[in-house]
Image: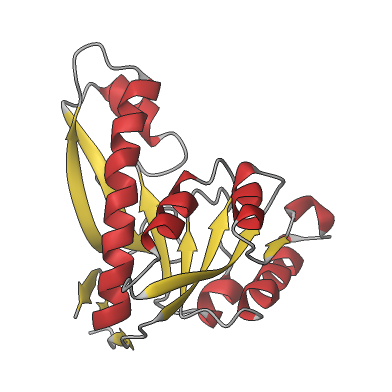
Amino acid sequence: MPQPLRVPACAPARLVVLASGTGSLLKSLLDAAVGAYPARVVAVGADRDCRALDIAAAASLPTFTARLGDFADRPGWDAALTAATAAHRPDLVVSAGFMKILGPQFLSSFPGRVVNTHPALLPAFPGAHAVAEALDYGVRVTGCTVHLVDSGVDTGPILTQEAVTVRDGDDEMTLHERIKVVERRLLVDVLAAVATRGVTWTGRKATIG
Protein backbone atom coordinates (compact mmCIF):
# COMPACT_ATOMS: atom_id res chain seq x y z
CA MET A 1 0.00 0.00 0.00
CA PRO A 2 1.51 3.38 -0.99
CA GLN A 3 2.18 5.77 1.85
CA PRO A 4 -0.13 8.82 1.74
CA LEU A 5 1.33 12.20 0.90
CA ARG A 6 -0.36 14.98 2.81
CA VAL A 7 -0.16 18.58 1.65
CA PRO A 8 -1.62 20.72 4.44
CA ALA A 9 -3.83 23.75 4.08
CA CYS A 10 -1.75 26.80 3.24
CA ALA A 11 -4.13 29.75 2.97
CA PRO A 12 -3.32 32.34 1.90
CA ALA A 13 -1.47 30.20 -0.65
CA ARG A 14 1.39 31.55 -2.71
CA LEU A 15 0.91 30.49 -6.35
CA VAL A 16 3.58 30.30 -9.02
CA VAL A 17 1.90 29.93 -12.41
CA LEU A 18 3.72 28.26 -15.33
CA ALA A 19 2.42 29.07 -18.81
CA SER A 20 3.32 28.81 -22.47
CA GLY A 21 0.47 30.54 -24.29
CA THR A 22 -2.26 33.13 -24.15
CA GLY A 23 -2.52 33.25 -20.36
CA SER A 24 -6.29 32.84 -20.17
CA LEU A 25 -6.02 30.58 -17.11
CA LEU A 26 -3.59 33.01 -15.49
CA LYS A 27 -6.01 35.85 -16.14
CA SER A 28 -8.84 33.91 -14.51
CA LEU A 29 -6.69 33.38 -11.40
CA LEU A 30 -5.71 37.04 -11.23
CA ASP A 31 -9.36 38.06 -11.57
CA ALA A 32 -10.34 35.65 -8.78
CA ALA A 33 -7.47 36.46 -6.42
CA VAL A 34 -9.05 39.46 -4.74
CA GLY A 35 -10.78 39.99 -1.44
CA ALA A 36 -11.18 36.81 0.58
CA TYR A 37 -9.91 34.43 -2.11
CA PRO A 38 -7.38 32.21 -0.26
CA ALA A 39 -4.52 32.36 -2.80
CA ARG A 40 -2.41 34.93 -4.60
CA VAL A 41 -0.24 34.65 -7.71
CA VAL A 42 3.29 35.65 -6.69
CA ALA A 43 5.18 34.94 -9.95
CA VAL A 44 4.73 33.66 -13.49
CA GLY A 45 7.19 31.43 -15.34
CA ALA A 46 7.30 30.41 -18.98
CA ASP A 47 9.32 28.28 -21.37
CA ARG A 48 9.04 30.78 -24.24
CA ASP A 49 7.94 34.31 -25.04
CA CYS A 50 4.16 34.32 -24.70
CA ARG A 51 1.14 36.45 -23.93
CA ALA A 52 1.03 35.11 -20.35
CA LEU A 53 4.22 37.05 -19.57
CA ASP A 54 2.60 40.25 -20.83
CA ILE A 55 -0.40 39.64 -18.56
CA ALA A 56 1.94 39.09 -15.61
CA ALA A 57 3.89 42.25 -16.38
CA ALA A 58 0.67 44.26 -16.60
CA ALA A 59 -0.20 42.96 -13.12
CA SER A 60 3.29 43.97 -11.84
CA LEU A 61 4.17 40.34 -11.12
CA PRO A 62 7.74 39.03 -11.30
CA THR A 63 8.38 36.71 -14.24
CA PHE A 64 11.04 34.26 -15.36
CA THR A 65 11.68 32.30 -18.55
CA ALA A 66 13.46 28.94 -18.84
CA ARG A 67 13.78 28.00 -22.51
CA LEU A 68 14.61 24.35 -23.07
CA GLY A 69 16.86 25.24 -26.01
CA ASP A 70 19.08 27.39 -23.78
CA PHE A 71 20.32 24.33 -21.89
CA ALA A 72 22.66 21.52 -22.87
CA ASP A 73 20.19 18.87 -21.77
CA ARG A 74 16.80 18.41 -20.16
CA PRO A 75 18.18 17.84 -16.62
CA GLY A 76 19.88 21.24 -16.83
CA TRP A 77 16.60 22.84 -17.85
CA ASP A 78 14.78 20.96 -15.08
CA ALA A 79 17.25 22.26 -12.49
CA ALA A 80 16.97 25.84 -13.73
CA LEU A 81 13.16 25.80 -13.81
CA THR A 82 13.12 24.30 -10.31
CA ALA A 83 15.44 26.96 -8.93
CA ALA A 84 13.56 29.82 -10.59
CA THR A 85 10.25 28.55 -9.24
CA ALA A 86 11.57 27.82 -5.75
CA ALA A 87 12.94 31.36 -5.48
CA HIS A 88 9.35 32.57 -5.11
CA ARG A 89 8.55 30.14 -2.25
CA PRO A 90 5.32 28.74 -3.71
CA ASP A 91 2.81 26.80 -1.67
CA LEU A 92 1.28 25.54 -4.94
CA VAL A 93 2.49 25.52 -8.54
CA VAL A 94 -0.09 25.84 -11.31
CA SER A 95 0.65 24.40 -14.75
CA ALA A 96 -1.64 26.68 -16.73
CA GLY A 97 -1.17 25.74 -20.36
CA PHE A 98 2.52 24.95 -19.77
CA MET A 99 3.56 22.87 -22.78
CA LYS A 100 6.54 21.05 -21.31
CA ILE A 101 6.68 17.88 -19.21
CA LEU A 102 7.98 18.78 -15.78
CA GLY A 103 11.13 16.91 -14.80
CA PRO A 104 11.95 14.72 -11.80
CA GLN A 105 13.84 17.40 -9.89
CA PHE A 106 10.94 19.81 -10.22
CA LEU A 107 8.34 17.29 -9.11
CA SER A 108 10.43 16.07 -6.18
CA SER A 109 10.88 19.67 -5.04
CA PHE A 110 7.12 20.33 -4.97
CA PRO A 111 5.57 16.93 -4.19
CA GLY A 112 1.79 16.92 -4.38
CA ARG A 113 1.77 20.68 -4.92
CA VAL A 114 1.68 20.95 -8.72
CA VAL A 115 -1.82 21.32 -10.20
CA ASN A 116 -2.66 20.99 -13.90
CA THR A 117 -5.79 21.33 -16.02
CA HIS A 118 -6.53 19.17 -19.05
CA PRO A 119 -9.27 19.67 -21.69
CA ALA A 120 -10.71 16.14 -21.57
CA LEU A 121 -12.13 13.67 -19.08
CA LEU A 122 -8.97 11.79 -18.16
CA PRO A 123 -7.86 9.08 -18.59
CA ALA A 124 -9.42 9.64 -22.03
CA PHE A 125 -7.40 11.70 -24.50
CA PRO A 126 -4.23 12.63 -22.62
CA GLY A 127 -1.57 14.74 -24.28
CA ALA A 128 -1.45 17.94 -26.31
CA HIS A 129 -4.27 17.24 -28.81
CA ALA A 130 -7.10 16.19 -26.52
CA VAL A 131 -9.86 18.29 -28.07
CA ALA A 132 -9.10 17.27 -31.66
CA GLU A 133 -8.78 13.62 -30.66
CA ALA A 134 -12.13 13.68 -28.85
CA LEU A 135 -13.80 15.10 -31.96
CA ASP A 136 -12.09 12.60 -34.23
CA TYR A 137 -13.20 9.74 -32.00
CA GLY A 138 -16.79 10.89 -32.14
CA VAL A 139 -17.49 11.13 -28.42
CA ARG A 140 -20.70 12.89 -27.45
CA VAL A 141 -19.35 14.08 -24.10
CA THR A 142 -15.89 15.34 -23.20
CA GLY A 143 -14.90 17.87 -20.55
CA CYS A 144 -12.18 19.14 -18.26
CA THR A 145 -10.01 17.57 -15.58
CA VAL A 146 -8.03 19.24 -12.80
CA HIS A 147 -5.36 16.92 -11.42
CA LEU A 148 -2.12 16.72 -9.52
CA VAL A 149 0.98 16.29 -11.68
CA ASP A 150 3.09 13.15 -11.54
CA SER A 151 5.90 11.94 -13.82
CA GLY A 152 3.55 10.77 -16.59
CA VAL A 153 1.64 12.66 -19.27
CA ASP A 154 -1.69 13.69 -17.70
CA THR A 155 -1.62 10.64 -15.41
CA GLY A 156 -1.69 12.29 -11.99
CA PRO A 157 -4.46 11.81 -9.42
CA ILE A 158 -7.70 13.53 -10.37
CA LEU A 159 -9.00 16.33 -8.14
CA THR A 160 -12.19 17.14 -10.06
CA GLN A 161 -13.81 16.77 -13.46
CA GLU A 162 -16.77 18.28 -15.29
CA ALA A 163 -18.43 17.14 -18.50
CA VAL A 164 -18.96 19.27 -21.59
CA THR A 165 -21.38 18.09 -24.29
CA VAL A 166 -20.08 17.86 -27.84
CA ARG A 167 -22.56 19.62 -30.11
CA ASP A 168 -23.41 18.76 -33.68
CA GLY A 169 -21.30 21.03 -35.85
CA ASP A 170 -18.58 21.58 -33.25
CA ASP A 171 -15.06 22.06 -34.52
CA GLU A 172 -11.93 22.10 -32.41
CA MET A 173 -12.12 25.83 -31.73
CA THR A 174 -15.78 25.99 -30.69
CA LEU A 175 -15.53 22.93 -28.47
CA HIS A 176 -12.30 24.07 -26.87
CA GLU A 177 -13.73 27.49 -26.08
CA ARG A 178 -16.61 25.91 -24.14
CA ILE A 179 -14.20 23.62 -22.32
CA LYS A 180 -12.03 26.62 -21.39
CA VAL A 181 -14.98 28.28 -19.65
CA VAL A 182 -15.32 25.23 -17.41
CA GLU A 183 -11.56 24.87 -17.04
CA ARG A 184 -11.10 28.39 -15.67
CA ARG A 185 -13.87 28.00 -13.11
CA LEU A 186 -12.75 24.57 -11.94
CA LEU A 187 -9.14 25.67 -11.51
CA VAL A 188 -10.14 28.68 -9.41
CA ASP A 189 -12.41 26.51 -7.24
CA VAL A 190 -9.88 23.67 -6.80
CA LEU A 191 -7.03 25.96 -5.82
CA ALA A 192 -9.22 27.64 -3.22
CA ALA A 193 -10.23 24.26 -1.83
CA VAL A 194 -6.67 22.93 -1.67
CA ALA A 195 -5.41 26.14 -0.09
CA THR A 196 -8.03 26.07 2.67
CA ARG A 197 -8.39 22.32 3.24
CA GLY A 198 -5.22 20.65 1.97
CA VAL A 199 -4.99 17.48 -0.10
CA THR A 200 -4.02 13.86 0.54
CA TRP A 201 -2.52 11.78 -2.27
CA THR A 202 -2.45 7.99 -2.00
CA GLY A 203 -1.68 5.95 -5.12
CA ARG A 204 -4.27 6.86 -7.76
CA LYS A 205 -6.48 8.78 -5.32
CA ALA A 206 -6.31 12.41 -4.27
CA THR A 207 -8.74 13.79 -1.71
CA ILE A 208 -9.21 17.45 -0.85
CA GLY A 209 -9.80 18.04 2.83
Taking the spot 34% from the left edge, 17% from the top edge, the residue there is 171
Q: To which quarter of the image does residue 191 belong?
A: bottom left
In this picture, residue 209 sits left or right of residue 115 = left
- Look at the image and name its color scheme: secondary structure
The C terminus: image quadrant: bottom left
Q: Is 139 above or below relative to 155?
A: above
Taking the spot 39% from the left edge, 81% from the top edge, the residue there is 12
Q: Residue 101, can we see it?
A: no
Q: Residue 56, can we see it?
A: yes
Q: Residue furthest front?
A: 35
In this picture, residue 154 sits left or right of residue 53 = left
In this picture, residue 70 sits left or right of residue 26 = right
In this picture, residue 200 sits left or right of residue 41 = left
Percent position (x, y) of residue 35? 35, 70
Taking the spot 66% from the left edge, 80% from the top edge, the residue there is 87
Q: How many numbered discs?
A: 0
Q: Is 100 above or below relative to 41?
A: above
Percent position (x, y) of residue 145? 28, 51
Q: To which quarter of the image does residue 119 belong?
A: top left
User: Which one is nearer the viewer's eye here, 16 or 34?
Assistant: 34
Q: To which quarter of the image does residue 130 belong?
A: top left
Percent position (x, y) of residue 19? 56, 52
Q: Residue furthest top?
A: 169
The N terminus: image quadrant: bottom left
